[in-house]
Image (cartoon, rainbow, N blue to C red):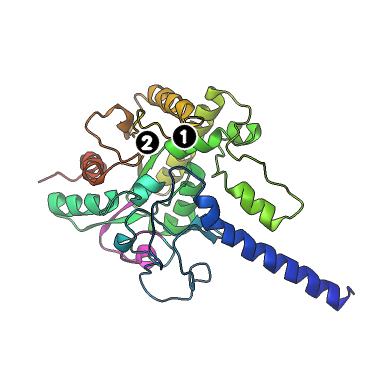
Amino acid sequence: MRNHKIIQHEMLILMLAWVFGVGCCVFAGEKTPPAAAPMGETINLLEPHDNPFLSGRLKPGYAYHPFFDYSSVHGQFPDDIQLDYFGFRNDRNLYFDENREYLLVLITSGSEGAGFSHRTTIAEHLEAILNEESGREVRVLNLAVNSYCISQEISTYVHLAWHLQPEVVISLCGWNDMVYSQVAPLNFKKLGLAYPNFYEGWSSAIHPVISPREDPWVTREGSDDEITDGFLRNIDKYRTLVEANGGRFMMGLQGFDGTSGDMPLIYPRVYSLMRQLSKKMVGREGFHDFTLREDMEFVDAVHSNDTSSRLIAETFAPMVMRALGVRMN
């Protein structure tokens, strides 16, 4: 039997590593583009609860979660952000409505879908439009979180929405995968496994023998085709999962402002990768290319303003209605 004091010592090290790692969430998040806007002092939770991964947190920022990496949406307008039980930007907990009588639409995305720069999210606009135009009761569940890549989107769908069998699933994505794939190892690229680069800092905190890279934005080897094709394989995976569960899948390739001047060392290749994705996705079913839109307005390279939040919802609304077989009024 192992010495009791040794076991206690190992448990203490693990606890300290975990606390330090979670504490790095907000710190690491501030190093990812774009720079974090001023935030409120407390998290605006939907209700007091016993979720050990959110309860007791005082400040907005990335909150570790064992089933989908992290949650806790944050943005430029903290007073407008309401978090549900699992840390997503919803004013209701729809996760437990298995006997629902309404149509359910799911949105997954990164900070654009989470509404980093929006007082009213794309999901909120979309729900209002669908209820007004369809004559049916429709609810939209928003599972978008800052910095999410397509792999995190798939995880949230599987763990939080699979049992609900949403009729329509929308992914508004592309940008984060093209950003973070550049700095991911080659074998990750080949499988489309992009991840926020601050994960490497978390790993070094949990596993003290691992030393983080001095500059997390230094790119690793991998061709443009390896990055874009890996991403598209994951989009196909996501579609297959949704359709196997009885839903309809659609995707929007995020728009961007290539004149913003943000992150000059990283973003020029992102712009190029997004344009390559745009060409590769022509003709795909249920696809809308926001990179080609000239009527969108942005507050930085990738976050649109409130007017464009509504515009994106208005674009998806008829696509959703057709998928549901419902005519717009």
Q: Is residue 176 left or right of residue 130?
A: right
Quadrant housing residue 308? top left
**Residue 159 location, x and y as percent?**
49, 57
Name the amino acid, label 1.
Met
Left or right of residue 137, residue 223 in this image: right
The numbered dot on residue 10 is none
The outermost residue toward the left is 329
Instruction: Please give the name of the residue rendered at 49% of the width and 73% of the height, measured from the top-left corner.
Output: 56
Residue at image coords 34%, 53%: 76
Assign a secondary structure to mark 2: loop
| Residue 79 percent coordinates (x, y) | 31, 63
Residue 109 spot, x, y in % from top left = 40, 46
The kind of secondary structure element at disc 1 is: loop
Q: Is residue 19 above or below residue 5?
A: above
Which residue is identified by label 1? 263
Q: Residues within 10 Å of mark 1 (few under 14, many from 20)?
A: few
- The quadrant in which the N terminus is found is bottom right
Q: Do residues under tags 2 and 1 come within 8 Å of each other at their CB atoms?
A: yes
Residue 301: where, in percent of width, then height?
Answer: 37, 36
Instruction: Mark yes or no: residue 151 visible.
Output: yes
User: Could you give the CA–CA distance between mark 2 and mark 1, rounded to whole angstroms?
Assistant: 9 Å
In the image, taking residue 49 as reference, residue 82 lies left or right, namely: left
Task: Using the image as rendered, state which of residue 288 and residue 326 is in the foreground.
Answer: 288
- Magenta residues (range): 88-106
Residue drawn at the location 80% of the way across and 72% of the way down: 9
Q: What residue is pinned by disc 2?
A: 301
Per the image, is 257 magenta? no
Magenta highlight on residue 93 = yes
The reply to whether residue 289 is visible in this rendering is: no
